[in-house]
């Protein structure tokens, strides 16, 4: 999952272990997808997603900016913020976030699409009655996108690193 083609993080003390980064991806419910947009402009858009076994899945409309961008260039990045605690008196923010780099593809196989949609629906529906009917109703009116994760970097503020280190002494 990690690769030499990606930059090393400069502030290594703030690097989260890979297991914690994956845990954040599993727990959180939305992130910002960054794509190569129109006319060379970056295009960043929030999406609800599910992370499973090294892949991120989300749904999108059949046509639109995301679809056009993915078809033009499959390389994407995806950012999830777990913590964003502004500390005005300290002139800082206590943060924890994860950035993923990977390749996106629109799932064309009906079985893959169904599996991805079910993973997404299960995460957000919490076993609600009527889930199957909702999946069937929307199935032909949306696309499912899979991001194969190539690189993950999790980072937290130095203050959280210090808190963690202080706790480990007690």
Image (cartoon, rainbow, N blue to C red):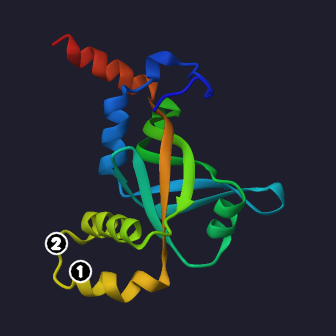
Q: Residue at x 54, y 19 (%)?
A: 11
* Residue that extends furthest to the right in the rendered view of this protein: 39
Rendered view: 163 above or below 56: above
Question: Which quarter of the figure has residue 115?
Answer: bottom left
In the shown orientation, is residue 66 left or right of residue 156? right
Per the model, the C-alpha gap separating discs 1 and 2 is: 7 Å
Rate crowding at label 2 as few (under 14), some (14 to 19) or many (20 or more) other CA atoms within 10 Å: few
In front of the other: 105 or 22:
105
Which quadrant holds residue 119? bottom left
Asked if one can make out residue 87 in the rendered structure from this viewpoint, the answer is no
Please give the name of the residue rendered at 47% of the width and 34% of the height, measured from the top-left corner.
89
The structure residue drawn at horizontal position 44% and vertical position 37%, both measured from the top left corner, is 95
Q: Name the residue at 30% across, 69% down.
A: 118
- Please give the residue where the numbered disc 1 appears in the rendered image: 131
Residue 149 seen from this side: yes
Instruction: Locate the C terminus and report the quarter of the image it occupies.
Output: top left
> Of 74 and 95, which appears nearest the observer?
74
Q: Is residue 1 left or right of residue 118?
A: right
Find numbered disc 1 in the image and state the secondary structure of the residue it sits on.
helix
Could you tell me residue 21's position as x and y percent? 37, 36
Cβ atoms at labels 1 and 2 below 8 Å apart:
yes
Identify the residue at the far top of this view. 169
Q: Which mark is residue 29?
A: none
> Where is residue 10 shown, x and y percent of the image?
58, 19
Element marked by disc 2: loop
Instruction: Give the x, y percent position of residue 76.
Output: 61, 49
Please determine whether, in this image, residue 169 is positioned above or below residue 83.
above
Q: Which residue is mark 2?
A: 127
Judge by depth and name the residue closer to the eye, 34 or 82. 34
Looking at the picture, how far across and down is residue 65, in whole percent?
67, 70
Is the residue marked by circle 1 packed among few (<14), some (14-19), or many (20+) residues within 10 Å?
Answer: some
The quadrant the N terminus occupies is top left
């Amino acid at each position: 999952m990690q690769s030499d083609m990606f930059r090393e993080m400069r502030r290594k003390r703030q690097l989260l272990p890979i297991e914690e980064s994956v845990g954040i991806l599993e727990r959180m419910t939305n992130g910002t997808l960054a794509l190569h947009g129109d006319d060379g402009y970056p295009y960043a858009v929030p999406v609800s997603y599910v992370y499973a076994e090294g892949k991120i899945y989300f749904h999108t409309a059949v046509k639109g900016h995301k679809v056009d961008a993915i078809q033009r260039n499959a390389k994407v990045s995806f950012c999830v913020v777990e913590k964003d605690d502004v500390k005005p008196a300290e002139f800082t923010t206590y943060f924890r976030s994860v950035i993923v780099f990977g390749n996106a593809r629109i799932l064309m196989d009906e079985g893959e699409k169904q599996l991805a949609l079910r993973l997404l629906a299960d995460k957000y529906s919490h076993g609600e009655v009527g889930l199957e009917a909702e999946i069937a109703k929307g199935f032909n009116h949306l696309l499912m996108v899979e991001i194969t994760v190539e690189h993950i970097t999790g980072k937290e503020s130095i203050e959280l690193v210090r808190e963690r280190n202080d706790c480990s002494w007690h």
